[in-house]
Amino acid sequence: MPTPQTGIFALGTASHAYLEFDLLPSVDAASVVARVASLREPRTTIGGVNLVAGFRPELWAGVAPDAAPIGLTGFDEPIVGPTGYTLPATQHDIVIWLTGAAYDVVFDLSRDVLTALAGGAVLVHEVVGWPYHHDLDLTGFMDGTENPTLVEATTVAFVPPGAPGEGGSVLLLQQWEHDAVAWDGLPVPSQESVIGRHKTDSAELDPQPPTSHVARTDQERFGKIFRRNIAYGTLARHGTIFVGFSASQSTLVRMLDSMVGRDGDAPDALTSFTRPLTGAFYFVPSAESLAALGEDRRA
């Protein structure tokens, strides 16, 4: 089976950068994708920095149709709930996700990536992330409690062997900004009702509030995903970068529909305290599929 890009599993890294690019008009898409593939051999790291590359699904399908999942589409239309709460669509062509032990090495490689893609793609969105007290979200709650183990992740987050796009993954990337003042003004029991977990040990509430974040994104109901969420921002504006990997786009779409109440139930209570600024789907191909395109360019 083709292997996933190993940077997806680089847990414990202290600095993250997400670089989203759009192709320049009239450039050859295949040549730009080949440039991305040539940034490095995707099963290793560069100078202690992990690099993961993803592509707008339609772009990847046009360049590597035999290595693309069937029916995968970009986040091209906003998702609007019955109350008007909106998940914006900010789809771009390429995402480069860099992680490392410190931001200086991540910054240096970010500059190298920018130089390598110059003339073919332009940087349109950049955000830097960092872990908060090891595994907490900026709400103060543990994030990723239901994450599968790394062994389990290979079965839930990646396209299975024999299927188009095998070894690759569907990435949902969103930047959520928190209303820190409103959130911090809630007493802890009210915060726990919104999240659906106890703040001290992350144990699920019993009974579970039906509008809690846990209930509205229940992985037993919608399917498992592998999350690499991280905090970002300044004192004035901060929140969570949602980084969710799945073997199936439908799992992620159903969770989003549930959060905004588009499935007929009440919206996720957490949406009263956080709002998404961005939203994009990317296909993150297997290491072998990406390396092959880089080899074609070097040949």
Image: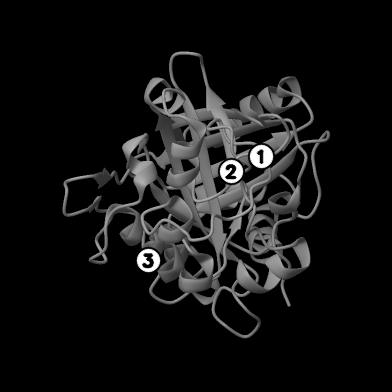
The residue drawn where x is 40% and y is 49% is: 280
Which callout, 1 or 3, points to the residue nearer the camera?
Answer: 1
Q: Which residue is mark 2?
A: 229
The mark found on residue 200 in the picture is: 1
The answer to whether the residues at label 2 and label 1 have Cβ atoms under 8 Å apart is no
Q: Is residue 130 left or right of residue 56?
A: right
Q: Is residue 57 visible?
A: no
SS type, badge 2: loop
Q: Residue furthest top?
A: 235
Tell me: residue 287, above or below residue 45: below
Q: Residues within 10 Å of mark 1 (few under 14, many from 20)?
A: few
Q: Which residue is mark 3?
A: 254
The answer to whether the residues at label 1 and label 3 have Cβ atoms under 8 Å apart is no
Ranked by sequence position, the earlier of labels 2 and 1 is 1
Q: What amino acid is found at the position of numbered circle 3 in the picture?
A: Arg
Q: Is residue 299 left or right of residue 247?
A: right
Q: What amino acid is found at the position of numbered circle 2 in the picture?
A: Asn
CA distance for labels 2 and 1: 20 Å
Where is residue 103 shown, x and y percent of the image?
Answer: 71, 23
Tell me: residue 259, above or below residue 142: below
The residue drawn where x is 32% and y is 38% is: 272
SS type, badge 3: helix
Ranked by sequence position, the earlier of labels 2 and 3 is 2
Where is residue 180 shown, x and y percent of the image?
Answer: 43, 23
Q: Is residue 74 left or right of residue 108?
A: left
Tell me: residue 40, above or below residue 286: above
CA distance for labels 2 and 3: 19 Å
Determine the image quadrant of residue 75: bottom left
Ranked by sequence position, the earlier of labels 1 and 3 is 1
Between 295 and 220, the one nearer to me in the picture: 220
Could you tell me how many numbered marks the image carries?
A: 3
